[in-house]
Image (cartoon, coloured by chain):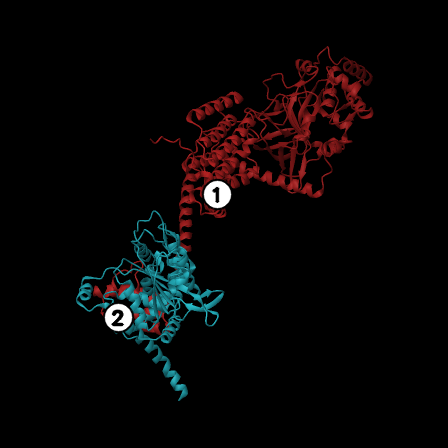
Chain colours: A red, B cyan
Amino acid sequence: MIKAQPRGTDGRLLSSLPWTLGALGVSLAPHVLYLPVWISAAFLVCGLWRYAIEKRRQMLPSRWVRGALALLCFLGVLGTYSSVSGVGPGSALLAIMASLKLLETRRRRDQFVLLFISIFLVMSSLLREQYLWSLPYLLIGTLIIMTAWLQMSAGASQTARRSFSTGGRLLLYAAPLAIAMWILFPRLASPFWAVPIDSSRAKTGLSDTMSPGDISSLSQSDEVAFRVRFDGDIPEPRDRYWRGLVMTKFNGRSWQGSEPQDARLRADEIEYAGDAFSYEVTLEPTQQQWVFAMDMPREWSLSRTLMGPQQQLWRITPIEQRVAYNVVSYPSYRAQASLAKLFRGWYTAVPENSNKRTAELARSMHELAGSDAAFIDAVLAKFNNEEYFYTLQPPALGSNPVDRFLFDTRQGFCEHYASAFAVMMRSAGIPARIVLGYHGGEINPMGGHLIVRQSDAHAWTEVWLEGKGWRRVDPTAAVAPERIEYGARDAAFEGFGESWGFNAPTELLQNLTMAWDVLNANWNDWILGYGPDKQNSFMKWLGMEDPDWRKMLLSLVIIVIVLILAISGFMMLRNRPPKKDRASRLYLKFVKRTGLELQIGETAQKFSKRAAAENKLPKETIDAVTNAYLEARYGVREDAAVIRLNDALRSIP
Amino acid sequence: MQRGSTLEQLPTGVDAQRAAIESAQKALGSIILGKQSQIRLALSCLLARGHLLIEDLPGLGKTMLAQSLAKTLGLSFRRIQFTSDLLPADIIGVSVFRQERGEFEFQPGPVFSQLILADEVNRATPKAQSALLEAMEEHQVSVDGETRALPDPFFVVATQNPGDQIGTFPLPESQLDRFLMRVTIGYPDQESERELLAGEDRRLMLNDIEPVTDPETLLALQTSVRKQKVSDALIDYVQALVRFTRESADIEIGLSPRGAQALIAAARAHSFIEQHAGVFPDDIQAVFPSVAGHRLKPAGSTRFRSPHELCQHVLDSVAIP
């Protein structure tokens, strides 16, 4: 009796399985950094397991095992993210299910499903980030998947090299269509869909509290905060204070941004003077509301953006995507010449039980100095003349950080000085607040723009003086003037280079960095920043009047049709029959005269028999033309035969 | 006059060649009735210095065609009946020790003839088959380390029975390639069969045939054939055909460059027999099924049942440029 044998794999997929695994691996690569480690490990395990099954002709895991694994992995994702929607959990789920799908890949059809999934995975990496290098990755990833696809569908005789070149050619054919779609597909100001932002992602940048150590940790980050393109000259470094958020509340240890509410328009309280700077800022996404501008902004183009009570710009919605906006700033200004009593109390508040030594020192120095202005000078002179050090590695400060910094450690970064200075001012009864933002920035000589990085993050103070309004005082300038003159990157730190492994960059490296930045800036401007506004102006530049989405869709359809026609025309041109010689042209004339049509594969002799049978022309004429034609095309004395052919044709009435 | 005579001799030479071919065709036609195109193909094959494989059922005149070819062309003829116990030495010959002279003497085998009929070639073992096929390819044989040239012209007509399955060793594709043409003879039509039945015994008729040429004339014919003009337009056509066989979904393995060369060589001979001014597409079409039929490997999914149908499909699909 024949017993049903359990069906194992037959090894048919052995040659194509590495391609499937490779395509999946390539598509998972950009996700690996964001996915939990266990998912990447599960992919590796599933891939190796599946390969071993095929190699040893074993059975695929049973339905129950697969179901249990799928449930387990689903719960794993749910446990890791406590959600299954959004970019993070979504791609995690896709990745793990693709890995599990390997375990039920029995036929070629299943492999194609996996290739579909890998294309989707490649594209979904764009939901996370769209860097300049995403483009080469997309191209190479798609090319590899295409190669795998062709390799699988073509069978064993096809070489990988040939699949690769065919895949490349197919992508090349698709490129004009993709470019046309990208340019013309209508961009909407408020899209119908929204990509959920991956909130789990740690973002470097300023936050809305400032404790000692916050900014010095930022100073190690090379990440670009924003880029600025000035319409005219670039201002001197000492004027380049990029105002972000203002912090007014001090709890003895950290500063916070909670602020007194006032319905009045703060912009009215600023008097502007002198020359203006006009520039465009391209701000990287911060997930925060602050809009950075140079002191003191007067006009800005970003929509839904207001000036807050402390003269800081903020947008109603967080900046989740890169934005570009134009600003006009006046370095000379006077803000809030008068300050209500209530606010004075607010701006001089310090917690009573902390930093007592600082408060005492401030009061005695204020008495000694006599006036507010003299007191400010005295404090700055203290920072300058006494042994205070500007360092990126300040020691820990404990519970009364200002006391400890001022009297004991005497080493700090800008936030220590700003905080100490503001506390001293407040203790002496002078309204003071801390401004957090960026200072300086690096000029890219190739692109002519200014790069402001996270390492340029800075904190300074503003004090309010009767009749003069809020004045910027940067205590860091008193300690490390070079920080203000040349920027944080170039400020000379003793031992800094060695301890962090940085050395003075060589010129070549510097140039490469700058070229890369120009490339990135243009990429951001033109590719990623190609939104409704840019599309609109580009369409106008192309000559489209009044561009709207209907016209763009219509042009898109026209371009697609034209492209298809052009490509098929090109193919036809390439495969067209060779140019006919004279004898052929004469013969075709003769064929036309007979009223018959030459069939595919019909020789002249066969045609002559058919023509004679149909009695279209006298048999002698047909024979004469046919013989002359055959000799002219295939015989020895062509020229004479062509003349005979011509004569024979003329004899036809 | 010396000069005048050479000038006059050349056209008469070609005329004599043409006349010889015509009379050969006629003589062959009188024995093998109603098979003009097969006779033409066999002659083309011979003139193109190729070897011929005749594949058909028994009793259709395979042997008769080979024998009458030898006879009309005046070639020395040997027949080798291939059987499963045939040894290579039975084909090539052996060295025999002569006691009286105290040395070995080579006894040439049947392969040392101008026309060889290898009857039922697929009945022999591959070893015996390859002995013959090697001789066909090299035009020489090596015995006891000594290379011996085969006669010139050297022409092999092999026959095989496609119906036989048991106890046969079908020739592999690579060896089929050694044959310039593979032809089938097929049943005669009503009229020819009637004439055959009413007429004399063909075997006796064979004895009465007078050779119309001699080996020297045949060699000269073969040289003339190679001078038949092949125009660029014709090469375009051959290339189009070859490309089609390589790209068609019905064909797994298309024509190789050697196959294309064989096609042109056979068409040259055919156009010479047909007295064409050059090689015409008609010549290509006439020889294509026999030259390409055994060289194409049809795809498993093809709807064409025989190589002949497949070849006709190729001819009907490729426009003549």
The residue at the point 30 percent across, 57 percent down is B161
Label 2, label 1: how far apart the Cα atoms are: 65 Å
Q: Quadrant of the C terminus of chain A?
A: bottom left
Q: Residue furthest bottom?
A: B1
Q: Residue furthest front?
A: B100
Q: Position of residue A320 (x, y in %)?
A: 55, 28
Residue A23 is left or right of residue A633, and the answer is right
* Chain that bears disc 1: A
> Depth check: A119 or A136 in front?
A119
Q: Which residue is mark 1?
A: A147
Residue A619 shows in this picture = yes
Q: Position of residue A428 (x, y in %)?
A: 76, 15
Residue A227 is left or right of residue A554, and the answer is right
For residue B26, what is the image quadrant? bottom left
> Depth check: A23 or A568 in front?
A23
Position of residue B83 relative to residue B211, above or below, is above
Q: Which residue is mark 2?
A: B206
Disc number for residue A16: none
Q: Which kind of residue does numbered mark 1 sit on?
A: Thr
Q: Position of residue A145 (x, y in %)?
A: 48, 40
* Chain that bears disc 2: B
Residue A84 shows in this picture = no
